[in-house]
Amino acid sequence: MRYLNSPKWNLFGIVILTILSTAILWTSDLGGVGMGWLIIMYLPVAIGIVTYLVYLLSRIFTKRYNWTISIIGMAFSLFLSIQFHFFNN
């Protein structure tokens, strides 16, 4: 439980999942999207940055259960990347 609330491990998890989500999107075929692929490709990076900023703001106001924000942001980024990778038309 000590690792869950540690800012170092939360930042590490956010960065690793952001890199993984971006790699998933870079391997997907988004040829039919046009120029919109630029926005889609960097969406996990934007989500990772927003997740970490919200995490830092929550650290200011509360000291417990901040890891839930990290988990939600990482899960959303990974979910979005998998959806674009497998289910794009």
Image (cartoon, rainbow, N blue to C red):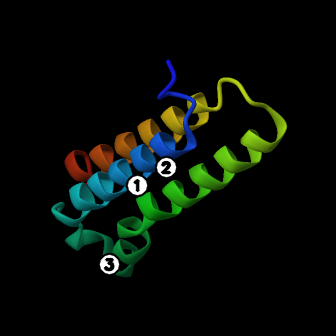
**72 horizontally vs 35: left or right:** right
On screen, 22 above or below 37? above
Residue 11 is labelled as 2
Quadrant of the rendered image containing residue 53: bottom right
Q: Nearer the viewer, residue 66 or 86?
A: 66
Residue at the far front in the pictured view: 2
Query: Residue 43: x and y, percent?
Result: 45, 62
The residue type indicated by label 1 comes to: Val
Q: Nearer the viewer, residue 1 or 53?
A: 1
Residue under circle 1?
Answer: 15
Query: Residue 10: x and y, percent?
Result: 50, 41
The residue lying at 34 percent from left, 73 percent from top is 37
- Closer to the N terminus: mark 2 or mark 3? 2
Residue 38 is labelled as none
Mark 1, mark 3: which one is toward the viewer?
1
Q: Are marks 2 and 1 in contact (CB under 8 Å)?
A: yes
Mark 2, mark 3: which one is toward the viewer?
2
On screen, 88 above or below 1? below
The residue lying at 74 percent from left, 30 percent from top is 63
The residue type indicated by label 2 comes to: Leu
Residue under circle 3?
Answer: 34
